[in-house]
Image: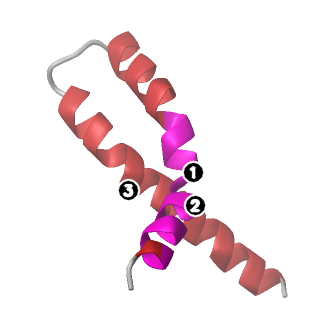
Amino acid sequence: MRGIISLLVIVYLVGVGVALAPTVQSKWNNSTASDLTASVVQALPDALAWPARAFRTITNRQ
């Protein structure tokens, strides 16, 4: 059971990283650290909700 929970947590965190990747990539070389941090913090709620977005995408398609 512990292994399944660990796997789910890892998949969730990888999904959050994938959702935040475009924000980090666009700001990495061209902005200050504070601007990058502000952008990541602003994008974090949407990134944390990626399972709900994926579920809605899957169920809306027929």
Q: Amino acid at mark 2?
A: Ala
- Outermost residue on the left side: it is 30
Q: Amino acid at mark 3?
A: Val
Image quarter hosting the N terminus: bottom right
Q: Is residue 42 magenta?
A: no
Tell me the chief SS of the magenta region. helix
Q: Residue at x 32, y 47 (%)?
A: 21
**How dense is the environment of label 3, judged by Cα within 10 Å: few (below 14), some, or many (20 and up)?**
few
Q: Position of residue 43 (x, y in %)?
A: 44, 33
Q: Position of residue 54 (x, y in %)?
A: 47, 67
Q: Are marks 3 and 2 in contact (CB under 8 Å)?
A: no
Q: Position of residue 11 (x, y in %)?
A: 55, 71
Q: In this picture, which residue range is highlighted in magenta?
A: 44-59
Q: Real-space Cα distance between discs 3 and 2?
A: 15 Å
Q: Nearer the viewer, mark 3 or mark 1?
A: 1
Q: Nearer the viewer, mark 3 or mark 2?
A: 2
Q: Secondary structure at mark 1?
A: loop
Counting residues from the N terminus, which is met first, the one under dot 3 or under dot 2? 3
**Residue topped by disc 1:** 49
Q: Secondary structure at mark 3?
A: helix
**Residue topped by disc 2:** 52
Image quarter hosting the C terminus: bottom left
**Residue topped by disc 3:** 18
Q: Position of residue 17 (x, y in %)?
A: 43, 52
Q: Residue at x 51, y 56 (%)?
A: 50
- Outermost residue on the right side: it is 1
Is residue 31 depicted above or below 42 in this figure?
above
Counting residues from the N terminus, which is met first, the one under dot 3 or under dot 1? 3
Q: Amino acid at mark 1?
A: Ala
Q: Are marks 3 and 1 in contact (CB under 8 Å)?
A: no
